[in-house]
Image (cartoon, rainbow, N blue to C red):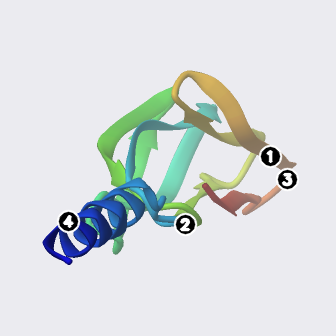
Amino acid sequence: MKKSIILSIVILSMIFLTCSNPFKENEFQINYGVDGTKASLITIENAAGGTSQYSNVNLPWQKTLTRKFKKNDFVYISAMNDGKGIITVYIYKNGILFKSASSQGQIAIAEVSGSL
């Protein structure tokens, strides 16, 4: 009787420990970037899950975030030019291009977003 209880506890423990969590955290490095002539406003999803804004930015511009992301965490960047030219935004995940977009003209806005 004792052996079967101990065996049951061991088997249940092994099952519990081997179950995978679908929301297991992974560490990613996210690089946000903007290219163009000059950006009057850049907005990003920051490491805390909120937004950060930068104004009157000389380009090229880059911001690197490293934190523990969960599956489907949101990343976002938008940039508005200073009234002329092309503006391009991009997001790299662990050094590989994840998303990018460009816009051109007066008061052009380029933005990309996605779930990891």
Q: Which quadrant of the view contains residue 72?
A: bottom right
Q: Secondary structure at mark 3?
A: loop
Residue underneath mark 1: 101
3 or 4: tag closer to the N-terminus: 4
Give the residue type at disc 3.
Answer: Gly
Residue underneath mark 2: 74
Q: Are marks 3 and 1 in contact (CB under 8 Å)?
A: no
4 or 2: tag closer to the N-terminus: 4
Can you say which quadrant of the picture contains the C terminus? bottom right
Horizontal arrangement in the rendering, residue 60 relative to residue 49 (left or right) = right
Residue underneath mark 3: 105
Using the numbered discs, state the Cα–Cα distance from disc 3 to disc 1 in whole angstroms. 14 Å
Q: Are marks 4 and 2 in contact (CB under 8 Å)?
A: no
Residues packed near mark 1 inside 10 Å, few (<14), some (14 to 19) or many (20 plus): some
As drawn, the label of residue 3 is 4
**As drawn, 82 above or below 109:** above
4 or 1: tag closer to the N-terminus: 4
Kindly identify the residue that appears in the image at 46 percent across and 64 percent down. 21
Q: In front of the other: label 4 or label 2?
A: 4
Q: In front of the other: label 3 or label 4?
A: 4
2 or 3: tag closer to the N-terminus: 2
Give the residue type at disc 2.
Answer: Phe
